Image (tube, helix red, strand yellow):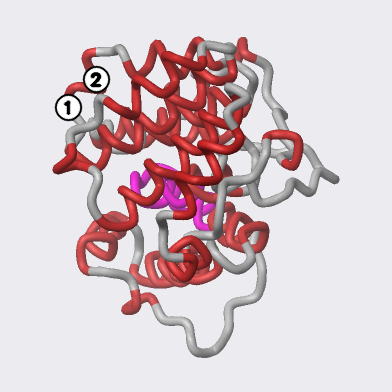
Amino acid sequence: MEGPELPEDVDFRQLDGPARARLRGLSKENAQWVGAHLVMAGRLLDVDPETAYLHAQAAVSRGGRIDVVREAAGIAAYRTGRYAEALRELRTVRRLNGSSEHLPLMADAERGLGRPERAIALAASEEAATLDADGRTELAIVVSGARSDLGEHDAALAVLDRIPVAERSGDLGVRVLQAKSLALEAAGREREAAELLSRVDPAVLARLGGAPEDDEDVVVFDVYDDSVGDELDEGSAPTHEAGSSPSDAEGRS
């Protein structure tokens, strides 16, 4: 797979040092080609996630045994609504480097596949205890959404209320408020939800994309059976059914 065209201004050296170091196992020419596609995947993720996904897939075609390559593929798959594929890729990243940093994304992908119970189970695992403060807050946001999915509205709010004040600062703190607003809405408490968001600077909300999308606006492309959910842990290469064109699914939780 050659992938989408690379612009003339893209360069392997635009990757950060640790990512470039991870590509040293490839030949020089191949590392530069894979790295350039990773640069483009990162550059386009927020503005054109579908093309970012194609660049990540191109990188996987020549560098699929490298964790940062599979990480880019997993994140791009998540952002384009390919939740089953995102899970497979992020499991592979975990197998390759032992990191659990993407556990919140994995849990939210389970929600995207209509499996909120699995999202909650991931959050209750021993692995979740290894997350840093930001990771714990991200995971709590996902669990709150999963509880709402199950109609457990009091529990959805309680999860967010248990986040320590010190872990609710900056943009992540605003996202906690957005999640609480959604939980209140799901509980039928629309006025309280609106009042909560009215406390936030509208410019900050606009920069963060406003309130997260409703689930009915998200199209899920689950192209894999549950029975093959762990195949990539055995080292197989990812595939994607031809003809699918998912929407941007960022902001589920």
Above or below, 234 against 193 in this view is above
Residue 233 position by quadrant = top left
Can you identify the residue that label 2 sits on?
127
- Give amino acid for label 1: Thr
Q: Quadrant of the N terminus?
A: bottom right
Horizontally, is 164 left or right of 201 in the view?
A: left
Q: Are marks 2 and 1 in contact (CB under 8 Å)?
A: yes
Residue at 68% x, 34% y is 215
Compared to 5, does 144 lie above or below? above
Q: Is residue 65 magenta?
A: yes
- Amino acid type of the residue tagged 2 in the rendering: Glu
Residue name at image x 21 percent, y 68 percent: 17
In this picture, residue 104 sits left or right of residue 230: left
Q: Quadrant of residue 219?
A: top right
Q: Is residue 214 left or right of residue 31?
A: right
* Residue 91 % position (x, y): 41, 28
Residue 63 x %, y % = 44, 52
Q: Is residue 30 visible?
A: no
Residue found 55% across the figure and 68% down from its top:
44
Q: Residue 129, relative to residue 10: is it above or below? A: above
Question: Of residues 8 and 24, which is closer to you in this image?
Answer: 8
Q: Is residue 140 above or below residue 13?
A: above
Q: Specify start and end residues of the magenta stretch as a single range.
A: 59-73
In this picture, residue 191 sits left or right of residue 242: left
Q: Residue furthest right?
A: 243
Where is residue 198 shown, x and y percent of the image? 48, 54
- Can you give x and y, in whole percent of width and height, for residue 89 in the image? 48, 35
Residue pictured at 28% horizontal, 60% vertical: 19
